[in-house]
Image (tube, coloured by chain):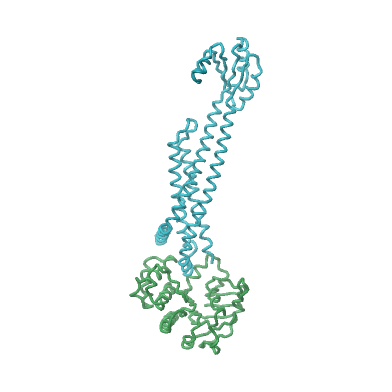
Amino acid sequence: MIRFENVSKTYKNGTSALKNISLDIEKGEFVFLVGASGSGKTTFLRLLLREEHPDQGRILEAGRDIGDLPKWRVPYLRRNIGCVFQDFRLLPNKSVFENVAFALEVIGRPRSTVESQVPQILELVGLTDKSKNLPHELSGGEQQRVAVARAFVNRPLILLADEPTGNLDPSNSESIMALLERINRTGTTVVMATHDKVLVDRMRRRVVELDRGEMIRDQVRGVYGIDEGVTI
Amino acid sequence: MRVYFRYALKETISNLWRNRMMTIAAVLTVAVSLSLVGSALLLKQSAAQASVVWQQGTRVSVWMQPTASTSEISGVRSQLADLPIVKNCVYYTQAQDLKEAKQLLPQNEWGVLTVSTMPSSFSCVPTVPSDAFVVINTFEKLPGVYQVTAPGQQIREMNKVIRVLQIVFLALAAVLLLSASVLILNTIRMAIFARRREVSVMKLVGATNWFIRIPYIIEGFIQGLLGAAVAIVAVTALHIWYPLHNEFQLNTSALLGTNAVVLVVGVAIGSVGSAIAIRRFLDV
């Protein structure tokens, strides 16, 4: 589903964010991306969204080199990738329902699709009774569930999550993880960058560890790390 | 498509309302500058039309000495008749000229005139207006001729004044148009800046650039359109109510043409301004 071939990325200020990364992620896999701040996790995700271009190497998604995509095709690429962030990125003046519906509206889905899909996904994330609330009326955990619902509502092939539990307490983190797992079970590939040792250790999924741009570990059913005490 | 149409319209209206002060400023600036553009265009057309009328009516007057003998007069008459560049001539006797002078001059001036002191004259129409000078040069030196005059000089002076006025108007209008486009650009930029979160989310979930761009372009389009509408009212009012001498008075089709130019310029400035404004925010 996702393939990195000798990908390197250096930012204009000279920071080397990724160094010669090669990696395959199969369809339906759940991958944790771990590493200290500045290790290149976010760059990795941004490359997948084509918010950045690699300096060297190729990135393939669903068998397609995304470097070859013309600029106008990029939005269509993103329709196949859902995104969740640490800071939720909900629209403050839209209700829960509208926030989720927005993702369908801007890609031109008809109203009938919106009206059938949104309640369904809100039920999946357990927020049916809050659909009319505004984001600031919700807890952090609930807001993140709205964000997950928005990312998943048009059934993307890939779900990217950049520290989705970074702002949440353990019990809310648990519920987000349960949600991501459920989404993963539908066949969606999930790539999640995280600092949360407890979650990673408990889930026992594939772990890719980055350190100053280099991939130092790629472990099936891994744990957060042996030297995790010094990270974060 | 219908879904999108509804969406774009809703977005546009809410944008316009949210930034209503800036919208009003932009619309008024467009209106003022386009009014000037329109007036300058009207002035230009008026002047061009009047100058054609004047030149067609150019008459060269050959004034004879009051003391000119009959043979001198008939000599001038036959020479004028032989000259191919002169279309036709009318002879005014001393009495006729006195009568005309009485109509043109105030009483204290014509009171001293008598038939014997009035020059008789030939009023001639040259085939081509610019040939008036040839007539002047040919007849000025002939015996019995007092003076040869043509209104060409005044026409030229008038044209010069009008040309300067046009340049001033157009320069002023250009500056104002520029400021109008900057204002529209700024309005749109503020609107987008206020909603950059929304725009970034739209990009995130895969909205195309055109999807994001169109409501803002419509917004600029409407601002330009409103400005142009006000300007059209102003230009039309000027056309209807400003008292102009006959030869300046333009017909309705000239007015319509001017208004069409005003409309197109206004709409173009609005749309292009907003398209430029949004470009920066759409870069991935």
Find residue B281 and report its horizontal and vertical position in percent: 51, 63
Say which residue appears at 55% left-offset and 84% top-offset: A209
Question: What is the number of callouts on the image?
Answer: 0
What chain is colored cyan?
A: B
Instruction: From the viewer's side, name the closer residue of B36 and A162.
Output: B36
**Residue A138 appears at what percent x and percent y?**
38, 75
On the question of residue B140 being in view, the answer is: yes
Up-down relation of residue A112 to residue B247 (above or below): below
Q: Quadrant of residue B63?
A: top right
Q: Nearer the viewer, residue B90 or B39?
A: B39
Which of B200/A5 is in front? B200
Q: Quadrant of the C terminus of chain B?
A: bottom right
Q: Residue furthest bottom?
A: A226
Hey, which residue is sitting farthest right in the picture? Answer: B141
Q: Position of residue B42 (x, y in %)?
A: 50, 39
| Residue that lies at the very extreme toward the front in this rendered image | B108
Q: Is residue A185 at least partly visible in the picture? A: no
Above or below, comparing residue B68 to residue B32 in the picture: above
Figure quadrant of residue B149: top right
Residue placed most toward the observer, A60 or B93 = B93
Q: Residue furthest left?
A: A129
Question: Is residue B150 placed above or below A127 in the rendered structure?
Answer: above
Q: Colour of chain A?
A: green
| Residue A69, percent from left and from top | 55, 68
Q: Quadrant of the N terminus of chain B?
A: bottom left
Considering only vertical position in the picture, is B151 above or below B174?
Answer: above
